[in-house]
Amino acid sequence: MATETKTAPITLTERALAEVKNIMQEKSVPAEYGLRVGVQGGGCSGMSYLLGFDKAKDSDEIFQLEGVNLIMDKKHAMYVLGMQVDFQDGLNARGFVFNNPQATSTCGCGSSFSA
């Protein structure tokens, strides 16, 4: 399992990156864990996004985003290529938002899509 130095297939906005770092500090996430981003079957549009802290596996690629290890299964890259993850903290909504150019349709909740 080698650490990759190439460009990550997704981006995190400044707000999203700050929130990830804040959560890592508040929840005392171990140093060997990184932010896993990916997809899984399910959701009202067929696929849903994965976002959480995890250890890297042999089938993963690891990218560096301003001090945060971004972990992604190599098979998931085609579904999220060019995606931007943002964090909203407003009166109507609070949470991570996925802006995915690969999605051909999305549902109202914003966490499910089809490609």
Image: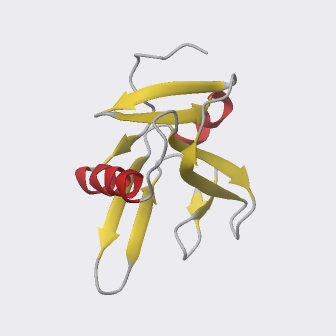
Q: Is residue 11 visible?
A: yes
> Residue 80: x and y, percent?
53, 42
- Locate residue 81, reporting x and y percent: 49, 37
Q: How many marks?
A: 0
Q: Residue at x 75, y 61 (%)?
A: 42
The structure's colour scheme is secondary structure
* Residue drawn at (53%, 34%) of the image: 71
Relative side of 50 to 59, left or right: left
Residue placed farthest to the top in the image?
A: 2
Say left or right for 60 vs 71. right
Of 1 and 15, the residue lying toward us? 1
Up the image or down, 38 lies above or below 48; here it is above
Name the image quarter holding the N terminus: top right
| In front of the other: 35 or 50 | 35
Residue in the picture at 71% in, 51% down: 40
Q: Is residue 37 above or below residue 98?
A: above
Is 109 placed above or below 96 here? below
Q: Quadrant of residue 89?
A: bottom left
Residue in the foreground of this view, choosing between 30 and 65: 30
**Residue lying furthest bottom in this view?**
91
Does residue 84 lie above or below 71 as drawn? Answer: below
To which quarter of the image does residue 87 belong?
bottom left
Instruction: Tell me, yes or no, if residue 103 can be seen here.
Output: no
Q: Position of residue 72 (x, y in %)?
A: 57, 34
| Residue 24 in picture, x, y percent from top left | 40, 51
